[in-house]
Amino acid sequence: MQRVWRTVTGFYHVCARGTGKRLIFEGDDDRREFLELMRECCREEGVTVIAWCLMGNHVHLVLADYEDRMSAAMHRLLLTYARRFNKRTGRTGHLFQNRFDRRSLDTDWQVMEAIRSVHADPQEVGVSLIERYPWSSFPEHLRAYDGDVADAARGFSDPSCVLELFGSAEGFIAYSLSTPDGSEPALCDMKETEWERHAFADKMAKSLGVPLNELKTVAPSRRDRIIFALHDGGYTVREVERYTGISKSTVSRIVRAYARVKAQAELSE
């Protein structure tokens, strides 16, 4: 017999995971494409996105579905994104693990707790503080409380439910930053997160004329100059390798060569 998933409130907590814990996003362009597809698929099926968070190998969503169209929206979203991702990366096979997981939310408290847990996922796994993570709806809801209607309309979630549930920005922030056991956030002393370092490295590379994800394709002289600038700016060889996809041996060779040139120039002054 087919299982009935419909909840009395119409709210669900949904999670889609990469098969075998594989990454489902290789960069910010992938994340933006997923969000645009999510907005398109949900709107066409009459499903409302209340909250969202994109992690490396999974996605958390809080959805409102009053017409039992969530399965159609999610099926189209995951299938379309997987096809585009595989075509772009040259990969084959399933990108997502079986069907998506979903849990019905039958009370206001369950909806509030689902929103909190979705936004808290980066902090709970040690990636970033909630308020500093860029790939969740947390900042969208804050802007809605600030009354920025135009900016909220450009977002990927509908903040009206959050405004109604929490009542004030202070209440939303306090509840969002709390932990289930009342303890302090695990990352309260974090100085700089990985995504922040990556984002700043990309900003530095762009200021020199080439985004990080295009560095492999430019002329060696230009590539080498940017790699040395990144290293000179405090990034390790492994970080440069991770952010650019250029091999560790190549990055090390470039750094050593430019270090020698720099040392010789300083001696001659």
Image (spheres, rainbow, N blue to C red):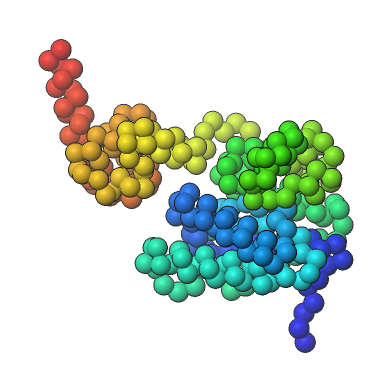
* Image location (x, y in percent) of residue 190: 57, 33
Q: Is residue 78 above or below residue 210?
A: below
Q: Is residue 103 above or below residue 134?
A: below
Q: Is residue 265 visible?
A: yes
Judging depth in this view, the residue of 52 and 269 nearest the camera is 52
Q: With 165 as the anchor, is 187 left or right in this view?
A: left
Answer with the quarter of the image where residue 227 lies: top left
Q: Is residue 127 above or below residue 58?
A: above
Judging depth in this view, the residue of 106 and 239 nearest the camera is 106
* Image location (x, y in percent) of residue 72: 66, 72
Q: Is residue 2 above or below residue 191?
A: below
Residue drawn where x is 50% and y is 41% of the image: 195
Q: With 154 as the anchor, is 20 left or right in this view?
A: left
* Image location (x, y in percent) of residue 224: 23, 38
Judging depth in this view, the residue of 255 and 164 nearest the camera is 164
Residue drawn where x is 32% and y is 33% of the image: 208
Residue drawn where x is 68% and y is 71% of the image: 71
Residue drawn where x is 70% and y is 36% of the image: 148
Q: How many marks?
A: 0
